[in-house]
Amino acid sequence: MKNVTDASQTTFHPQPKRRFPIASVVIYAVLITWTVVALFPIFWTFSTTFKTAVDVTQGHILPFIDFQPDWKGLRSLGLSPDTIGQPSTVRDEFLLRLTNSITVSLMAAGVATTLGSLAGYGLARFDYRFGWMRNNDISFFFLSQLILPPVVLAMPFLVLYKNLDLLDTKFGLVVVYVLAVLPIVIWIMRDQFKSIPVELEQSAYVDGCSIWGAFLRITLPIAGPGIVAAFLIAFILCWNEYFFAALLTSTAAKTLPVMVASQTGSQGISWWSMAAIASAAILPLVIAGIALEKYIVKGLTAGAVK
């Protein structure tokens, strides 16, 4: 009876309805607005590929609403459905520039990631002294190289490459790109290895591993996502580089960014051709970002011990 009485006297209070706070609405509105602003240049580039001259000059934006899509941009590169089976010197040039960009960017990013991983591991695990400089000073010295404007190095590199016969060569571009992206890779990998507990390597030493053995078997696999993220950043920086590619190449080693900037003439700017080439330059980065997304996310949180 007591249990029945207690149950009968129990009162149930309805849960208050949760209101969607105004602050959340404002935050989502700002994020959506910023997303549209950030993605609009990419949308404009892809849509301009399928515009005619009239659509470009009149500022038509929405396909099938403001304008009817056309193959003009891809046709100018010999890549439209009606020209893909025909010989095209423009298409051959485009494929050559695309191949140059892929080759140079992959090689430079690979070399920079390899050297940067070794340098970052050394700065994270060992104490160095170079004059008054210690580890933190050496790390900042590497990062400070990014402060130097590339135009300052134009004349020295031009004279040096001319004497070494490296002008208009892919090897010459790879060397420059490695020097350009190596500081940021070193900084990223140093922080990556610092986040990995040193006790894991000490346990490997107890089991008989050497320094190299512990690095290759223990530390490197844990830092894998961070290495992938550093490689992707280096690849993007090399892929988008224009200044040295325009300065140190003329015909054989030109890359896609140089070809994009060359779509001007006495008749004006070929917006559709420029947009088509730019779209081709954007696509590999989008595909790489989507394919390696999980590794990039893991790279931001790698090193945690569960």
Image: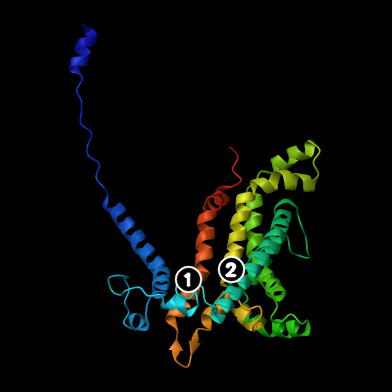
Q: Residues within 10 Å of mark 2 (few under 14, many from 20)?
A: some
Locate the N terminus and report the quarter of the image it occupies: top left
Residue 174 lies, in percent from the top left, at 69, 71
Q: Residue at the location (53% across, 84% down)?
A: 262
Residue under pointer 2:
237
Residue under pointer 1:
279
Task: Tell me the colour scheme of the image.
Answer: rainbow
- Of circles 1 and 2, the one toward us is 1
Q: Is residue 137 visible?
A: no
Q: Which of pointers 1 and 2 lies earlier in the amino acid sequence?
A: 2
Looking at the image, residue 290 lies above or below residue 14: below
Q: Quadrant of residue 90?
A: bottom right
Q: Residues within 10 Å of mark 1 (few under 14, many from 20)?
A: some
Residue, far bottom? 266
Q: Quadrant of residue 57?
A: bottom left
Q: Residue at the location (65% across, 68% down)?
A: 103
Residue 287 vs residue 253: left or right?
left
